[in-house]
Amino acid sequence: MVSNKGFHLTDGESAREGYRTYVDPATAGWGYSSLRVLELAAGESRSFDTGDSEWIVLPLNGSCSVACDGETFDLHGRTSVFDGVTDFAYAPRDASVRVTSTAGGRFALTGARCENRLPVRYVPASGVPVELRGAGQASRQVNNFGAAHVFAADKLIAVEVLTPAGNWSSFPPHKHDEDRDGETRLEEVYYFEIADSHGTPGVGYQRVYPSGPDSATDVLAEVRSGDVVLIPDGWHGPSMAVPGYDMYYLNVMAGPSPERAWLICDDPAHAWVRGTWADQPVDARLPFYQAPSEVEAR
């Protein structure tokens, strides 16, 4: 029997300490991954201590400034997650951070408990690689802002995925819940935003199911903007964008593996699907957008 209890958090359900979404190792019942969503009114600021975790401040909509370790970075942000790639700021563990927004906005704080303290940094939107994955109705776009092979962090891995209406992403279903050859152990947070259409809020669906006798995560959730799905283990996928409504999700991952890498294993029952992509074009609606050039970003 499918049970979403504890794994699917609806918009605002995890609100805490002034954050609309608040997931950390203690509330999720795991060891590393965190996500907070901060909403600021015009002219408002919020300060927080990073503690034992490293963080990326990522605008979902709106712009802000991020002050940390004696430096201040102005994040130009974006109108919405469906409108463009955004710049972002990285804050190390054992630091104090202040986020200020002149016009107001919504900002994701993606975090991971870590051991090493790295330098505070700013990355422009032009430095975010945009990748197209899959083909046909499994086509999707990935903004690799915090991917392991793109951005240097200690434990944190984070990417954005955009799926055109009617397509399936996170497919074939895959897992990363063991440390072994070709796979790393990573806890994962999915944070969703679904585009409105014709004045109607959109919906999507997310599936997670056990990968073995020691895996208990079993979710079939109808997700809406602001919802979160927690994946401590198990096969996850597909993420389904219903016809008429584009889907966005933010993935936050971290875990105990010595190697910071996104190494996954496909469900053998569905792995054959990858072999069909060579004969199919990528969905013509992709990419939704490209990262701006360095000149455009200035």
Image (cartoon, helix red, strand yellow):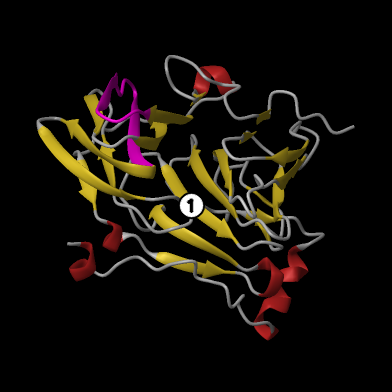
Residue 205, can we see it? yes
Question: Could you tell me what secondary structure mostly forms the magenta stretch?
Answer: strand
Q: Is residue 244 above or below residue 75?
A: below
- Residue 193 falls in image quadrant: top right
Asked which secondary structure carries label 1, the reply is strand
Q: Is residue 206 magenta?
A: no
Q: Is residue 259 visible?
A: no
At a point 27% along the width and 25% down the height, the residue shown is 44
Residue lying furthest right in this view? 1
Pinpoint residue 106: horizontal percent, then vertical percent: 40, 36
Question: In screen coordinates, is 51 left or right of 277?
Answer: left
Dot 1 amino acid type: Glu
> Which residue in the rendered view is the most extreme toward the top?
17
Left/right placement of residue 32 relative to residue 85 reads right
Residue at the far bottom: name it: 279
User: Which image quarter is the C terminus in?
Assistant: bottom left
The image quadrant of residue 3 is top right
Q: Which residue is the site of mark 1?
A: 160
The number of discs equals 1
Query: In what quadrant of the picture does the N terminus appear?
Result: top right
Q: Which residues are magenta?
A: 40-59
Residue shown at 43% from the left, 67% from the top: 289
Q: Which residue does the image show at 41% across and 32% down from the upper left?
A: 112
**Relative image position of residue 274 (x, y in whole percent):** 69, 71
Question: Is 53 inside the magenta-drawn segment?
Answer: yes
Residue 145 vs 278, above or below: the answer is above
**As rendered, which of 40 and 111 lies closer to the eye?**
40
